Amino acid sequence: MARVRYGARTEKEIASARTARSALPDIWSTGVVAVWESDPDAVAAVLPPPLKPIGRPLVRVNISRVDLAGQPLGAGSFAVAARHDDVEGWYPLVMPMTQERALTGGREVFGEPKKLGEVTVEREGLVVRAALARHGIAFVEVRGAVSGDLPLPAPARRTDFYFKFLPAVDGSGFEDDPVLVHCLREEKVRRLRRVTGDVVLRESMYDPVADLPVRELLEITLGERTTAQRGRAVERVSARALLPYIHQRYDDPQQVLDGPPAGGA
């Protein structure tokens, strides 16, 4: 009988796939990062407990193009500064990706708020434009001109905060208490340039980042980076406390309350 590809894989095949993942080389991306100070009340409002604001209401957007095994990948992140106990980091509100493969591991393993979208990084001479778009709306656009080289920073560590959860089958919330994840990212930079420009936030009912306005633009950079990450589940959090924020994950805020299909179809 010909092999049934949906059938169980052998232990050798599973071990081979695990070994291949652990031996991946550095994957370099070219991307634009913009950081600004926003409205402190708005930043505080988007943080589910137990996350809390830090001293400054910072917002960070990262828009990158990755050459992944010959297949270009667009990857973005729109995040606000936050802390959990004595750990400071970033809480991403939306992470558009251009490929489904990039969604799966991040959402299911780490709890990243990834969604399919359009990610653009363009450069023509000194002029740079980067954008995140979904449903035909470029809800974030960073534009400007390269204005000089910057010294390369030392390898750095950054923590991102995610909530990993599974909606309940009967539409009553979650199957279990959600988990707060600390994702430690170790980043290396091999080229960094200053960009003089601005950040445009456009209204979108699906990605309402315009509620976090640019009060003071701190920096825009264009760089080549590689990042390795590992996650750690640090604690169970209150399902009741997280539920009011769950619309951040879905275009339809009622999706988490969907029950099983009528008639068991």
Image: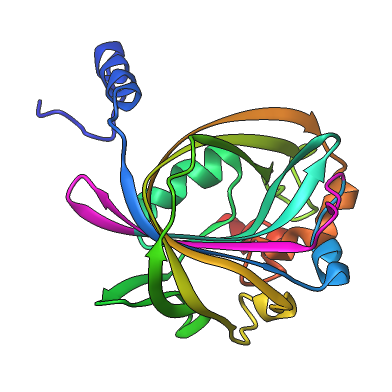
Residue 225 to residue 64: above or below? above
Spot occupied by residue 40 in the image (x, y as percentages of width and height):
85, 68
The residue located at (45%, 46%) in the rendering is 104
Question: Where does the N terminus fall, quadrant-wise?
Answer: top left
- Residue 179 is left or right of residue 230, and the answer is right
- Residue 110 is left or right of residue 31, and the answer is right
Q: Is residue 161 visible?
A: yes
Spot occupied by residue 51 in the image (x, y as percentages of width and height):
83, 47
Q: Is residue 155 magenta?
A: no
Residue 174 to residue 215: above or below? above
Spot occupied by residue 240 in the image (x, y as percentages of width and height):
89, 50
Residue 149 to residue 16: above or below? below
| Closer-to-camera residue (178/202) | 202
> Farthest residue toward the top?
12
Q: Is residue 140 visible?
A: no
Which residues, given as a range, are shown in magenta? 50-73
| Closer-to-camera residue (29/139) | 29
The residue located at (30%, 18%) in the rendering is 19
- Where, by quadrant of the figure, is residue 232 drawn? top right
Spot occupied by residue 247 in the image (x, y as percentages of width and height):
72, 65
| Closer-to-camera residue (32/65) | 32
- Residue 154 is left or right of residue 35, and the answer is left
